[in-house]
Image: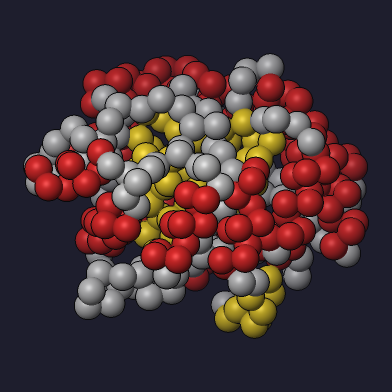
Amino acid sequence: MNSTNRREFIKNLGLLGGYGLTAGLIAACTTKSTQESTADSTSVDTKITSDLFFKISLAEWSLHRALQEKKMDNLDFPAKAKNDFGISAVEYVNQFFKDKAKDATYLAELKKRCDDNGVTSVLIMCDGEGAMADLDSKKRKEAVENHYKWVEAAKFLGCHSIRVNCYGEGTADEVSKAGMDGLRSLSEFAAQSNINVIVENHGGFSSNGDWLSKVIAGVNLPNCGTLPDFGNFCLKRDKDTCVDSYDRYKGVTEMMPFAKGVSAKSYDFDENGNCIETDYAKMLPIVKAAGYTGHIGIEYEGGKLSEEEGIRATKKLLERLGGI
């Protein structure tokens, strides 16, 4: 999730540095069937959804404008996903409840709202907790420990993973070595809670599918994996313009052997309802060929459609092209 809007949001949190840093910088779990009907789900949609090779979840970043503008609250997210979109699994973004990771009362209320609506918590996307691949071992250790509270929150909510960012400043080899160390340390801690630590392609070196897959292979722990995002393959930016990109289909192919979650990024759609930036008819078979049957999270970031329209358009596209 690295749209211009999100980059600005994260800049305000003081997360961006020079080149090599990223912008903010899932084993599937059981969920109720997305067959459950809602006000905007037709019987045809329900039947299509039941035949998908994956399960659909909703990434909270799809609603980031509504959340930032205080039109909705993080606690509203589970009911919003279920009642407005017919989606029974959610992926949180820690930025929207940043001070609540250790708030037992708050987390209990969030879990209750999930339970009341028949919604499964899938993962927490974590940003702003330090550089997991910082070349400074002291800062890297601090970043690892900063994620402990999110591992514990994820366990309480019933998630199977936290998404972290493998970023740092240095050469590709230096950042790779540091990243393996940081991820290994965090994954060893998370294993005690049966939580996965997964890395998204999220800018800089991490958007190189070959580089990231080798980092995960180097960690070599069963609970450390990837979260392939269909869109985040910018290797280098000049301000807000991407000047060097990695092939998205090659990148997802390289990351899928380690995938514990998948992010369906979308921005704009053509008159036939197809995503303009990513050919889903080409991308989804790559995901399927890897034997993946877990959640694919809708992450709409476009500006032409409203957030709600974009979520529905992405869901419809996944349902149309994701058949078994």
Q: Residue at x 46, y 57 (%)?
A: 285
Q: Is residue 149 above or below residue 57?
A: above
Q: Which of 63/71 is in front? A: 63
Q: Residue at x 84, y 55 (%)?
A: 175
Query: Residue 224 placed where, x, y %?
Result: 69, 36
- Residue 208 seen by the camera: yes
Q: Residue at x 58, y 81 (%)?
A: 241
Query: Residue 102 placed where, x, y %?
Result: 55, 23
Q: Which of 144/194 is in front? A: 194
Q: Which of 303/67 is in front? A: 303
Query: Residue 119 placed where, x, y %?
Result: 31, 29
Q: Is residue 117 above or below residue 13?
A: above
Query: Residue 94 placed where, x, y %?
Result: 51, 40
- Residue 94 seen by the camera: no
- Left or right? Give the position of 90 relative to 162: left
| Location of residue 223 (image quadrant) | top right
